[in-house]
Image: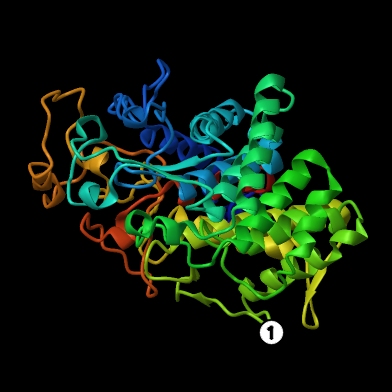
Amino acid sequence: MEVEKIVALAILIALASGGVSGDPDYHDALSKSLLFFQGQRSGKLPPDQSLTWRANSGLTDGYAENVDLTGGYYDAGDNVKFGLPMAFTTTMLAWSVLEFGRWMPKELNNAREAVRWGTDYLLKASAPLPSALYVQVGDPKADHDCWERPEDMSTPRSVFKVTPSTPGSEVAAETAAALAAASLVFKHVDVGYSKKLLQTAKKAFAFADQYRGNYSDSLSSVVCPFYCSYSGFQDELLWGAAWLYKATRNSSYLRFAQSLGINYNSETFSWDSKIPGAAVLLARESVVDENEAASGFREQAERFVCNVLPKSPSVIVNYTPGGLLYMLNGSNMQYVTSTTFLLSTYAKYLKTSSQTMKCGDAVVTSLRLRKLVKRQVDYILGDNPSRMSYMVGYGDEFPQRIHHRGSSIPSFRLNAEAIGCDEGFQFYYDDKPNPNELTGAVVGGPDENDKFADDREDYSQSEPTTYINAPLVGTLAYLAASFQP
């Protein structure tokens, strides 16, 4: 009996301190989430590259048009550099550093490096402004018909741009957002680089505003259906203006954001839909800084929170039986990570200002938002019905057959002989685990019933993307600070 009492007491103590109940190791997950971006690098890799199964690739990108477009990130499991999701990825990495960087001291330099790998490329793409902005490298249809390592690419590295006569306000404004956000990341560590980023951000935003049009109209044959902009460009103009206001403190950008008159419910924040993100970003002005001019954005931000909060009277999203936020069948995890980032950020604002908010008559605290964030991230890291971590390399069970060319084909460093376009499909259809671990990659995730097929051919569940991981970086830092020493 005494032994039972001692065991019971030990369990209670462990639970109180966050021990045996099994809080995930958020610090480890944060480190791995950043390592993933090394696996997505294009261009000449640096000497300190940790994922050594990768090698240089895309070293002549842009040369056909006499421009240097080397570098940047491949968006997912393919070898195309799509400007819109790459810029959004960079924005979210930068925002992660700005909001939560002080809570990732051991990883802060790695986070800045991940941002800079994106912005170095975006500066190159922006060099011709105001006459053009380069927005894509690679023929997506030819690329998706091949299964090749990035080091072996044999498909056309075609270059695409938007111009005054073929505009692309979405991608130009998102590029402006990325550069403006990153200018703040480097403001006190590389002043010259920060100024260059901000100057280019202003040019990109002016280009987006002056030459308004949908890039998926101008470049429909190469960006659709891959990254068609279904939401139009107004939300990107709002997003770009919000970031330029934050970077410059010039009230003209806040007035521009208000003049767009965007004021409607939205539950989706993604590479395509920016309204909730802009609302949360600008809501800080009202919640923390007590700037009455931004009160409308606070109202929008709190509507978003109520739209996604379980048991809220206005909740309009679904959750799986296991508790995962579920929006779409394809790559659902991108919405989980982007939503939890916004909830983390708004929880931080509420806590900083010692405030609460309301969904109907229900009072919502910072703690309630943090608990929801924790539940979603814990699910990703293995606290789910399948006991599967959806982050590669984290935990005992994680996806082994991810939909990713470089990960699934033997490394260039072990087999330098080129593996051709069609030849590579032998590895695509092979049921063996991928030979190269893309550490930190978060895949598209399970279906609406919490079922996951570890199947390379099921890209909707097994493909990782940069814009799944980017928001998760900040959230993991927040959780590590909130729940772990």
Q: Specify the amino acid type for callout 1.
A: Pro
**Kind of element beneath mark 1:** loop
Q: Percent x, y for residue 93? A: 57, 41
| Number of on-image labels | 1
| Image position of 191 with respect to 323: above or below | above
Left of 455 or right of it: where is 329? right
Which quarter of the figure has residue 191?
Answer: top right
Q: Position of residue 268 (x, y in %)?
A: 56, 67
Reply above or below: 93 against 378: above
Q: Quadrant of residue 361?
A: bottom right
In the rendered image, the residue lying farthest to the top is 47
In the foreground, 141 or 314: 141
Do we see residue 480 in this rendering?
Answer: no
Residue denoted by label 1 = 313
Query: What's the residue at 36%, 35% (across, down)?
Result: 39
| Position of residue 371 measured from the top left corner of the image (x, y, whole percent) | 65, 61
Q: Residues within 10 Å of mark 1 (few under 14, many from 20)?
A: few
| Quarter of the figure that contains the C terminus | top right
